[in-house]
Amino acid sequence: MKAILYIGHGTRSKKGAEEAKSFLQKVMSRVNVPIQEISFLELTEPSIDEGFGRCVERGATEITVVPIFLLAAGHIKNDIPEALFSLRRRFPNVQINVRNPLGVQERILDAISELVREAAGVMTLEDSILIVGRGSSDASIHASFNEIANGVQKRLNVDHVSVCYLAAAEPRLQEGVETILKITVGRVIVIPYLLFSGLLLTEVDHMVRKRENQGYQILHTGPLSRHKEIEDIFVDY
């Protein structure tokens, strides 16, 4: 019997965990597979082992693993394969198929552009965009964000789109915000390249509110999962 095991990142934020689970419940309600379970890589229950075990207990003989991740980095390339390696040994009769993370998609770039227009209205050449990534030491992440920045710039027709990161890569959030504020005449629209709420989004929100209180024209779009297209992509996946 076929099953799907969704693997999210996990968070210490209760709000973020509930948001991720609620999102996945919506996806599951629209996917016609008899067995579906939610799990998380770290910080949030149930774990990958628990979610996988529940699939097997419910009669799964073929499990498709769907990572709820935007881009491929250390978790996708190392942590999830390591967890699945031990499960393959424990359950040799269960076929395991692993989907790729979403990657850079036209549909995601279209959704991001709509989130920006929803938050900021009509964009002008004086406005700038700051994309904030989670961050990784994996070099491929930088290439992906260059592609994302180019796609967003093309769709929103602004002169300046910058990228910064919350951890593990440069420039960091504070530097990214300070730099773009210096060169922007109009508004700065910050795009947190994050699926759900959590501590990382809270960090972005605090930085934006701080600068707004200082008199700057700056705002952020919130998590990407606010746009229904993200749910639709996982359903189609």
Image (cartoon, helix red, strand yellow):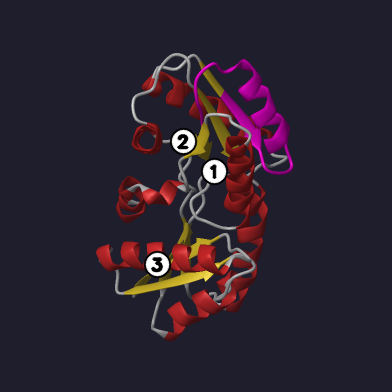
Tell me where the magenta segment starts and ends, as one range: 162-190
Q: Of the residues tagged 3 and 1, which is closer to the observer?
A: 3
Residue 38 shown left or right of residue 34 in the figure: right
Q: Nearer the viewer, residue 164 or 203?
A: 203
Q: Which of marks 3 and 2 is nearer the N terminus?
A: 3
Query: For residue 182, which quarter of the picture?
Result: top right
SS for dot 2: loop
Residue 229 shown left or right of residue 65 in the figure: left
Question: Which disc number belongs to residue 22?
Answer: 3
Which amino acid type is shown beneath numbered disc 3?
Answer: Ser
Q: Which of 23 and 176 is in front in this view?
A: 176
Residue 62 shown left or right of residue 146 in the figure: left
Q: In this view, does 198 lie above or below 145?
A: below
Q: Which of marks 3 and 1 is nearer the N terminus?
A: 3
* Residue 190 in view of the camera: no
Question: Which disc number belongs to residue 104?
Answer: 2
The residue labelled by disc 1 is 71
